[in-house]
Amino acid sequence: MSGEQPLDLNVNGVVHRVEVDVRMTLLDTLRERLQLTGTKVGCNQGTCGACTVHVDGRRVLSCLTLAVMADGRAVSTIEGIAGPDGRLHPMQRAFVEHDALQCGYCTPGQIMAAIACVEEGHAGSDDDVREYMSGNLCRCAAYPNIVAAVRAVAVEATR
Amino acid sequence: MTPFAYHRAETLAEAATAAAEPGTSLIAGGTTMVDLMRGGVFAPARVVDISRVPGHDAVAALNDGISFGALARMADVAEHPAVRRDFPVLAQSLQQAASQQLRNMATLGGNLLQRTRCGYFRDGRSPCNKLSPGSGCAALDGANREHAVLGGSDACIATYPGDWAVALAAFDTEVDLVSAGGNRSVRLADLHREPGDTPERETNLLPGDVIAAIRVPASAASSRSTYLKLRDRQSYAFAIASAAVALEMQGDMVVTARIAIGGIATRPWRSTDAEAALQGRRLTEASALEAGRAAFAAAEARGANRFKIELGPRVVARALLNAGGGTAS
């Protein structure tokens, strides 16, 4: 089967039936087909992490994921993590409180990666955070504040 | 990206039959495939998705070693307690590769088959004997700082960039294949090829071969093992030079050494010369460096990669001392 392919994308708990060219990535499908533009195109070759989303609970790079390969899987993006009343996710709040961004372009990917980093148990120390967040680049160099934000959430989560 | 037909396989046997047809490639994690296809380097007419084939993602202790399903994710195996305990070099080689996002996507089998990071190969338009046999090798007198000092030829000096295969190469690893022509096993040592006159042929796999499992025999050295990866950044970069070492020691005497090196050769590189240089000797800074130098005795520099002939032995030596706790001579 080539060309267009129908698939069911479960994004932030809502199932979308879309038809996409098999070449289309999950990233482009989210942004252009579902108008979920929070996930960013950075390098588009798997080296910057700006496109990070969760698929079936794991953080992955949506620029290297063909949309058809995410068929039927649970996708979680930056748009889906705040509460229904708009209350910020603890990681979002921590990024604001610790000034962990400047231009904001890498930020959705950083936050999605950071949430997973804490859940994986990889945020137990500053060095752990630096290592396990190394897949997310920040050209504005907000790194020290990103580390602080992630550590703050990790510490709070263990209370 | 060139259009392709997409098909999802339900079993590896089905995938093997499909993969035997010309112009067909398998996709599992997709981290190499999607990248190269979008870059125009690679254009299969048909892609067969094996990412949902069940039953090939387990880590299993065997009587005489350990077995890895080829569809296991790098992230999961890196954290597996038995791997960390019994074969630390294997767990470390996975953990130090890529990023957590990539490790969550990439499979053990696919990782073995990753392609070179040579910029000329990846740009899809420079002279490259891998992509277009006979067109030449732009790296020979080009930007070749990261290229190979071992295993190269006048046709190609592209470095094999992976870590997992290098760590596996230190042991007598076997790879189990499902194939339309009959399942079989091959030694990992026979899987990857040096470029020679045919750099377009990177492995000895036949069309229709699908990697199903990777088996590592137990050895007395495996639990005293480590992976040292030197790179331009502290994380999230390919190896400039790496070493996978495993030691069986008696006091400070090396009974058996297993040494494989990465980031510096055209394929995962096991060095029996380095191992022989150390066998039966006390592990010291001096003997460790001698072993390292033995590994690079046949190394050839091409322009900007000359430093690897000095750096490589030191990485081997440091890894040996890390593993064996050697004393200063």
Image (cartoon, rainbow, N blue to C red):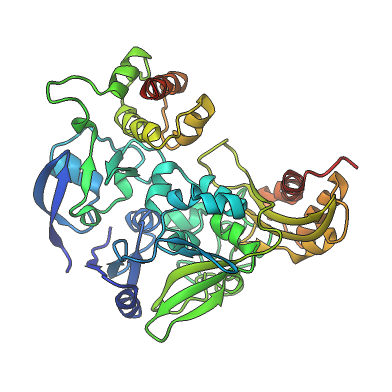
Is residue B28 placed above or below B74 in the rendered structure? below
Across and down, in percent, residue B104 comes to 39, 48
Across and down, in percent, residue B139 comes to 57, 56
Question: Image quarter for residue A61?
Answer: top left
Question: Image quarter for residue B43?
Answer: bottom left
Residue that protrudes farthest toward the front in the picture: B63
Q: Is residue B161 visible?
A: no
A29 sits left or right of B148 in the view? left
Residue depicted at 37% across the width and 51% down the height: B105
Q: Nearer the viewer, residue A124 or B230?
A: A124
Across and down, in percent, residue B195 comes to 58, 69
Residue depicted at 49% across the width and 47% down the height: B79
Q: Is residue B33 visible?
A: yes
Residue depicted at 60% across the width and 63% down the height: B267
Across and down, in percent, residue B41 comes to 39, 60
- Quadrant of image for the N terminus of chain B: bottom left
Residue depicted at 17% across the width and 69% down the height: A1
Is residue B299 placed above or below B212 in the rendered structure? above
Badge count: 0
